Image: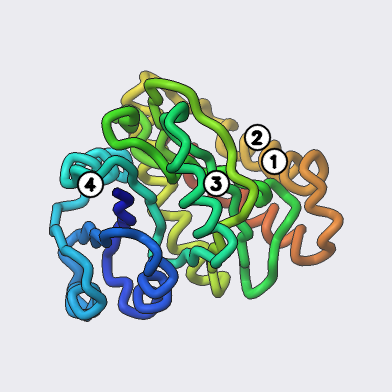
Amino acid sequence: MLTAIVLTLNEQAHLPECLASLAFADALLVFDSFSSDRTVEIAIAAGARVVQHAFKDYAAQRNAALDAVQSDWVLFVDADERVPAQLAQEVRSAIAQTDRAAWWVPRHNYILGRLTLHAGWFPDYQLRLLRPHCVRYDSSRPVHELAQITGTSAQLAQPLVHLNYATVREFVAKQRVYAELEAAGMRQAGQRAGAHQPLTMALRQFYWRFITLAGWRMGLHGALLALLMAHSQWLSYRNLRRDS
């Protein structure tokens, strides 16, 4: 049995298309952080089971969602993601194999309306298809969660579609949230930030995204994304220094 899990918080705009793309799953679970919009109503209308759970961080939320299912397999999908038919077929084929604990799924990230294949945004493998009893998420990594896998894993070929960051304002707003969580994780790990570290880490991030990961191949789009990610890195280390 395959259960598709969608973590939500006020996702009424994205959720209908997301759930429609998951019709191939045996069951749908919308694991909601007490949305104040129509998210729960939409989920119920689509035939999903809804569980509401207070959000602490992404790792804790995924672990709690895994504890809420009894399926042989789980497919995690974000509300702003879609599962194309080719990926759905590959998922069904993958779970028929008994020698894997988990599968990594590549993503096609659409950022500011454009498919983004450079600057570190592709193949962007995510651990999404897994056996619930074989995976836990590291509680010391509250954002960009790290999966601890018991058993072997492999990669799927077909990508998820990720409708990521429609506007610069949305990009910056989400990165502010991630920066707070990342700073909290670094503090928990005993890290501290020096006076110049926010700037130096931001410059390194820009160089890595734009030069090393070939963001330059996308022209102004690549430069803008590298700059936005550099700003996010600056925020993370500024927050760490602020609370050190």
Task: Please name the residue that numbered disc 1 is placed on.
Answer: 203
Task: Please name the residue that numbered disc 4 is placed on.
Answer: 65
Let me know if residue 164 appears in the view: no
Which x, y percent locates residue 136?
Answer: 31, 30
Colour mapping used in the image: rainbow
Image point (14%, 53%), residue name: 53
Task: Please name the residue that numbered disc 2 is placed on.
Answer: 200
Which x, y percent locates residue 91?
Answer: 49, 51
- Helix, strand or loop for disc 3: strand
The mark lying in front, picked from 3 and 2, is: 3
Mark sitting earlier along the chain (4/2): 4
Judge by depth and name the residue closer to the eye, 101 or 118: 101
Judge by depth and name the residue closer to the eye, 237 or 33: 33
Mark sitting earlier along the chain (3/1): 3
Mark sitting earlier along the chain (3/2): 3
Mark sitting earlier along the chain (1/4): 4
Mark sitting earlier along the chain (4/3): 4
Task: Please name the residue that numbered disc 3 is placed on.
Answer: 105
Please report contact status of discs 1 and 4: CB closer than 8 Å, yes or no: no
Image point (24%, 44%), residue name: 71
Q: Residues within 10 Å of mark 4 (few under 14, many from 20)?
A: many
The amino acid on which the numbered mark 4 sits, given as a three-letter code, is Ala
Image point (17%, 64%), residue name: 49
Which x, y percent locates residue 44?
Answer: 18, 75
Image position of 144 (left or right of 244): right
Gap between marks 4 and 2 measured at Cα = 38 Å
Please report contact status of discs 3 and 2: CB closer than 8 Å, yes or no: no
